[in-house]
């Protein structure tokens, strides 16, 4: 495993980490979750990503249960939560958003579900148009000073709002956000590469990127239709299937254009796509989302493939992505 600093912080995260989104508590039950976390940890993964909203808190409960059962030493791994969407299906006004009230309640609830005394990383899952940024920054600062959160950050915030959070923190001597959690993959690059370009240098922001395989599109498994036992084929995920596949075939066309480049390097498409994410030096950690042991074993090999992506290969990739 390779370890990378989370932006300008001193925290060393494994370059490949592991998340629980639509898998833990739904697709992945307890014994599989235990096996997957153990496998990741044994391969050097030290960051496990979660959120209050993932399966209405069940993903955090399951992860907390499994990590406790595995007796992972608390000083050897990091765990995150995210606040904004709420942990119940139909949240009341105080059970969602980024008000001081919900940021506090959500933190305490996540600590309980994950069975830890502090969260290593705590994210504002989306911007909240109904809460002033200054209120959220104060709330996060307080949690850090109370020892309940070590590093706080944002997820999918526009760059100007992140800058505002930094200004508020600087003017009031508060703890500033250390990291963003944006989507980043071969089919979705703009925010990480362009919109956030100045944030890495100016504020030392790190990034913990999500959906590195675009929910599996970048494995090639959807090229000939949607398999029943896949993420996009599962009941309840229709919204995600529509969001990713209702584009007149544009994404799949790009996936097909990338496949020969991976094949030429002798790499499975998934490993190639993950290596491409890892090659970006602004990526602190790539959060994997495997639902099966064989997938995780395969994906954990991606670090070895980064060296194959030389300038000539990167030029070929750019050419294949052009039509997007
Ligand atoms: P990916 O894009 O890597 O998608 C993971 C899914 O792709 C798996 O569950 C599996 O689905 C399929 N897959 C993975 N590897 C393989 C393989 N080798 N061969 C075939 N299929 C494979 O990651 P996620 O979308 O899960 O995102 C990763 C993490 O990021 C999440 O778990 C979560 O922690 C975080 N996240 C954060 C968000 C945010 O807003 N901050 C939003 C979304 C995710 P299947 O087997 O079911 O087909």
Image (spheres, rainbow, N blue to C red):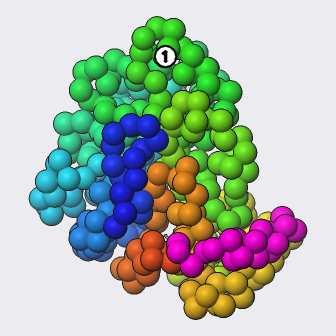
Q: Quadrant of the C terminus?
A: bottom right
User: Magenta residues?
Assistant: 306-324
Q: Quadrant of residue 26?
A: bottom left
One can see residue 235 in this view = no
For mark 1, what is the residue?
A: 169
Q: Quadrant of residue 301?
A: bottom left
Please state the horizontal and vertical placement of residue 112, each as a whole percent of the image.
Answer: 23, 40
User: In the image, is 23 to the left or to the right of 58?
Assistant: right
Residue 301 to residue 88: above or below: below
Label 1: element kind: helix
Q: Quadrant of residue 108?
A: top left
User: In the image, is 206 to the left or to the right of 323?
Assistant: left
Q: Along the line of sight, which residue is nearer the eye, 236 or 284?
A: 284
State the residue lying farthest toward the front. Answer: 311
Chief secondary structure of the magenta span?
helix
One can see residue 290 in this view = yes
Q: Quadrant of the N terminus?
A: bottom left
Picture residue at 33% right of the left edge, 39% below the top: 10
Which class describes the residues within 10 Å of circle 1: few (<14), some (14-19), or many (20+)? some
| 55 drawn magenta | no
| 309 drawn magenta | yes
């Amino acid at each position: 495993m390779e370890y990378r600093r989370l932006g300008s912080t001193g925290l060393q995260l494994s370059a490949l980490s592991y998340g629980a989104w639509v898998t833990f508590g739904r697709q992945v039950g307890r014994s599989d979750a235990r096996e997957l976390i153990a496998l990741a940890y044994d391969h050097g993964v030290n960051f496990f990503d979660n959120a209050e909203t993932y399966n209405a808190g069940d993903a955090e409960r399951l992860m907390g249960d499994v990590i406790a059962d595995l007796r992972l030493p608390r000083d050897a791994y990091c765990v995150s939560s995210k606040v904004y969407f709420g942990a119940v299906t139909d949240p009341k006004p105080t059970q969602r958003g980024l008000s001081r009230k919900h940021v506090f309640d959500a933190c305490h609830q996540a600590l309980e579900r994950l069975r830890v005394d502090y969260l290593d990383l705590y994210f504002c899952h989306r911007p909240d148009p109904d809460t002033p940024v200054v209120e959220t920054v104060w709330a996060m600062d307080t949690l850090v000073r109370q020892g309940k959160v070590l590093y706080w950050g944002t997820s999918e915030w526009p760059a100007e709002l992140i800058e505002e959070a930094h200004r508020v923190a600087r003017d009031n001597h508060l703890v500033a956000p250390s990291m963003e959690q944006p989507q980043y993959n071969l089919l979705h690059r703009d925010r990480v590469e362009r919109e956030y370009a100045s944030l890495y240098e100016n504020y030392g922001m790190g990034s913990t990127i999500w959906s590195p395989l675009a929910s599996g599109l970048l494995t090639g498994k959807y090229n000939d239709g949607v398999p029943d036992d896949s993420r996009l084929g599962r009941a309840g995920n229709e919204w995600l299937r529509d969001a990713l596949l209702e584009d007149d075939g544009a994404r799949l066309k790009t996936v097909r254009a990338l496949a020969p480049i991976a094949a030429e390097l002798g790499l499975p498409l998934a490993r190639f796509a993950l290596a491409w994410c890892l090659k970006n030096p602004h990526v602190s950690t790539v959060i994997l989302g495997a639902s099966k042991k064989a997938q995780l074993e395969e994906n954990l090999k991606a670090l070895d493939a980064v060296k194959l992506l030389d300038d000539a290969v990167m030029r070929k990739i750019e050419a294949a992505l052009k039509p997007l």
